[in-house]
Amino acid sequence: MRTPDWPRTATRWTQLTLAEDDPAHLDVGFWTEVMRESRSNAVCLSAGGYIAYYPTRIPYHHRSVHLGGTDPFGALVEAARGLGMHVMARVDPHAVHADAARAHPEWLACDEEGAPIPHWSYPDIWLTCAFTGYHREFITEVAREIVREYDVDAIFANRWEGYYGISYSEAARRSFRDDTGFELPKREHDGGDPAWPAYVAWRRRRLSELVSIWDAAVKDLRPHARFIPNLGAFAARDLDPDLVRRVYPMFVVDKQGRSGIEAPWAAGRVAKRSRGLYPDRPIGLITSVGPEHHQHRWKDSVAPPEETRTWIVDGFAQGAFPWFTKFNATVSDPRWVPAVVEAFKLHARLEPVLSKLPVTAEIALVDPSRAGQMRSGAAHAFPDEDGFYQALVEARIPFEFIADQVVSAERLRPYKVLVLANAEQLSDEQCEAIRRFVAAGGGLVAAHQSSLYDEHGGPRANFGLADVFGADLVTPVRGPVKNNYIALTDDHPVNDGFGGAKRVIGGSRLLGIEARPDTRVPFRFVPDFPDLPMEELYARRAPDAPAVVVRQGPGRVVYIPFDIGAIFWEALQADHGRLIANAVRWALGGEPEATVTGPGLADLAVRRDADGVAVTVVNLTNPMAMRGAIRQTLPLPPQTVTVALPPGARGATARLLVADAEAPVTIRDGRAEVALTDVDLIEVVHLTWDVR
């Protein structure tokens, strides 16, 4: 008998997203073999919503015109069950066909003038509004029909939020007005309109209620079944926390690959971001077998196999179980198959150890994916976070995320250092939690406009953490400025390693601050000077305003009053990365509990329990590390892994899980050392010991 906790055993997913013509030529045998070879233990299959791939009896539930007397969904369900797999049925409610639109215009998303919004990509279909009867009643009945007629464990909804902008349907207008007293806002992310923050909260509440309705509908028919909505890389923040605790057994994040300037560690960041908000929920990362190019959208194509393999592996290395998706069941290019099979087999091999050990870290980076939404128009752009993330990966400093909205004394307790890349919006309560964290000996590294706004985006006259930073705001941010430099003005560990340089590149958006008496200032801004003509390229005045402030009390604090994370991400100048790494290491006050040293770019994850540590090393050393797609992963040169042993530890042994071999261990100064060679894409060093 299946139980409601089945999602914890569904750890490798195949997803087949059917095209309308697939019923005419579906090769069930091919897909059965893919599931078997990849050791998939769960499958997500197209069932209904926009198109039904089974003989639905619900009016206006559009059957595939190629369905005839077949039932492709049912055939695939039967094949998966024959392999002992969990089965999830996919529905997509974001659009309807013309006949449904004519019969039910009240289902449609509308613009501000009340006109229905046509689909942007395909003619004569229409976008739906999530706040109408289409979602609450029609899709509920579709979900119930599927669960009633087929042996499935869950319904999975793609694009379930309907129209992504503000829908001005009559149902949405009425619901918003009744709930808040406001009319719908005219523009998104308008911090000056009181209706906007009300809309953000209302939308979250209504979407959460919708998920609750759907989940109850499927559990009414099958008590173990669940309704699981697809989430974008940031969307868990939009859900009501109480609802998550009640009805979300896991998260599925639709970050299918990287596009443009994006590092392959972005796969692992998905897991960290989810864990930073809901640490007890399993998280799945959807990987497309095709390239993720948002402009050209080659959705029926194949990415270079090494890119696919790396994306899946970095995701599960950081704790996101693998899930691949193929759009269109016809396989015109099979090169994705070996890459998926190899990556999934790696996961199956490592899962027995990794699944039992929680991911741990001494450093937490505050995830600002909620803060800034109401103040900034760029809801998904966080270049400061990107830069700090890249710097910590380059420096081989293991770290976790903590979501900005859950910063509290309890959530900070496991960490030794907190990093605020640009956590602009912090409440008084959050500032107090950070203040107490530092007073108790915790380290803090903060930059740019951190704590300069309250949780609603309202500006403060001074930093909410001014007393912790040891710095007061004198002049607000200015910029962008060009040709800015910071001078090394005080010998301190944060300005180590600059090779005798007297000054290095500064920032582009600068805050004027005054350092308090109990601080030191190891960097100061060089006053502005021209960048043209070249003959005028010299400093006129000595360095003056603080560019880095450090303060040591019970805890160590570094504050950097410029956009160091954003400018590092934009320009990737090594000195910015070095300064970030120096600041974090000094704030930590010692060597990290686990280190990996050696050449190359590697993403690290550390898992620990009382009996041992597993250090995962993902090799990202390749010519296309910062812009996909990866053609080749270069073998990682020799590395040294060290782990601090707990008091009383003895008899440390090490096993390389990918190489499937024992490794010699050297004990030196209370640390276990293991040499690592011949790493292709991933290796896991599993150290265990006895404790007296």
Image: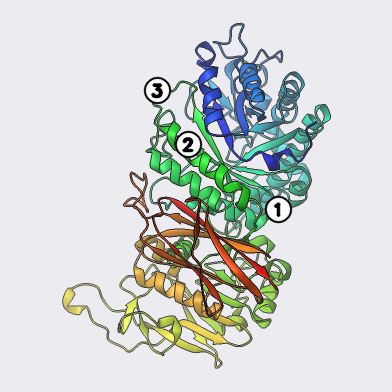
Going by the image, does 537 lie left or right of 665? left
The answer to whether residue 379 is seen in the rendering is no
Amino acid bearing label 3: Ser
In the rendered image of this protein, does residue 313 appear above or below residue 538? Answer: above
Crowdedness of circle 1 by 10 Å Cα count: few (<14), some, many (20+)?
few
Q: What label does residue 332 carry, if any?
A: 3
Q: Nearer the viewer, residue 360 or 374?
A: 360
Q: Nearer the viewer, residue 472 or 668?
A: 668
Q: Which label's residue is closer to the chain start, 3 or 1?
A: 1
* Extreme residue in the left direction: 535
Q: Position of residue 317 (x, y in %)?
A: 53, 52
Spatial separation of the CA atoms under disc 3 and disc 1: 40 Å
Spatial separation of the CA atoms under disc 2 and disc 1: 27 Å
Considering the numbered disc 2 on the image, is that residue within a helix, a strand or a loop? Answer: helix
Crowdedness of circle 3 by 10 Å Cα count: few (<14), some, many (20+)?
few
Q: Which label's residue is closer to the chain start, 3 or 2?
A: 3
* Extreme residue in the bottom direction: 517
Q: Quadrant of the C terminus?
A: bottom right
Amino acid bearing label 2: Val
Q: Position of residue 136 (x, y in %)?
A: 74, 31
Considering the numbered disc 3 on the image, is that residue within a helix, a strand or a loop? Answer: loop
Task: Read off the residue under disc 2.
Answer: 340
Quadrant in the picture for residue 546: bottom left
